[in-house]
Image: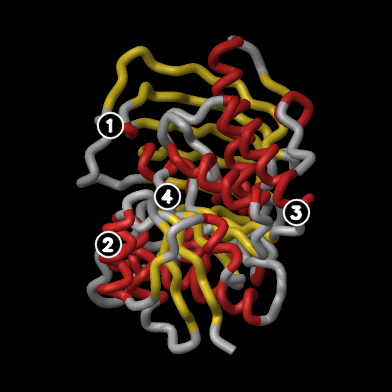
Amino acid sequence: MPLRLGIVGTGNVARQQYLPFLSRQDDVELMYLNRTRSKADACAESFGGRVVDSVAGLVSAEPDAILVLTHETQRLAASRALLDEKPRRLFFEKPLVARNGQANVCEDDFVDAREMLKRARAAGTQTAMVFNYRFFDQTVRAQRIISERAFGPLRQASLFVNYACWSHCIDLLTLFGGRATEIVAIEGSTPYGAGNQRAVDVTACFRLAGGATGTIVGTSGTSFAFSLYEIYLSFEKGIVRFSDLDNGVEVFENGSPYAERHDLVGSHGRSDQYDASFGKALAAYLDTVRRAEPPPVPGIAGLEELQFEAALRRAVAAKRPVDVQREFPLDA
């Protein structure tokens, strides 16, 4: 039986990062829903599939999964409408909710996202996130090295992040170190960037559930010509450092006089690595749908990322440390 996938939101993200891969899958049938019918029609013409006229019509067609690919400022409304119809599975672009754009997440975004996941659970709807940076070659290599060489628990972490990669890098921090338990933060006074990326800088210190401490800086003030993020992870028995969408991984192992660097072979530019990661993320997700298994990146991962951001914003506003798990419980 073919997989039937609903696509809600047929803008640039869907057309550029999702539909080229999905349209090449022999066992996938696509259905499109967009506020502007002509955009959905254009996708059907370019990538195959058919257009539906309503949320109810889409869910009544019994898709195996619905991919919510709207702009983040519209994702909450789209998801609420879908949950009214109790779909089987929802797969979300990131961040899960961001009414003011991904560079300006607020506490209400976390509260709304938590309520949304509660509704999904009550409806029996399985939820999943994309977080395709988990599927970058350097991320996968770093995870394998840490596991195979028994680097032990994370002790310290340092991240410098352009807001274009902000939610992804917070997710990576959680992936490698666990949930945050305490955050203190300050912000700058001058906004940088444009559109939904326009925001002031923020600098935070954090403690994670496993005891690790560290810092994270978010900014729209760095050029896209430079590295979009730098991540430094110090474990009990070694250090891993990686950066940007297409740079390699550096490894420093306790007891070894050598440092290692693992670089991508051949011509792999930033856009190549970025585009390929969506195919890897989607392939992993579709495999779990076919086997009726839990998704590789569950919906709760999107809430954990928003939890970190909401706590950070409260720490800035209140000028005090925030007890993350007590003040922003997940309970989804």
Residue to which mark 2 is pinned: 271
**Colour scheme:** secondary structure
Mark 1 vs mark 2: which is more N-terminal? 1
Question: Which of pointers 2 and 3 indicates the residue nearer the eye?
Answer: 3
Rendered location of residue 123, percent (x, y): 75, 54
Mark 1 vs mark 4: which is more N-terminal? 4
- The residues tagged by marks 3 and 1 sit, at their Cα atoms, a distance apart of 36 Å
- The residues tagged by marks 1 and 4 sit, at their Cα atoms, a distance apart of 17 Å
Mark 2 vs mark 3: which is more N-terminal? 3
Q: Helix, strand, or loop for circle 4?
A: loop
- Any part of residue 260 in sight: no
> Which one is nearer the viewer's eye here, 99 or 87?
87
- The residues tagged by marks 2 and 3 sit, at their Cα atoms, a distance apart of 38 Å
Rendered location of residue 54, percent (x, y): 48, 56
Residue at 62% x, 39% y is 113
Q: State which quadrant residue 50 falls in.
A: bottom left
Circle 4 residues within 10 Å: few <14, some 14–19, many ≥20 = many
Image quadrant occupied by the N terminus: bottom right
Establish if 213 lies above or below 22: above
Image quadrant occupied by the C terminus: top right
**Mark 2: which amino acid?**
Ser
Question: Residue 142 vs residue 192: left or right?
Answer: right
Residue at 47% x, 47% y is 231
Residue at 69% x, 46% y is 117
Residue to which mark 3 is pinned: 123
**Mark 1: which amino acid?**
Gly
Q: Helix, strand, or loop for circle 3?
A: helix
**Mark 3: which amino acid?**
Ala
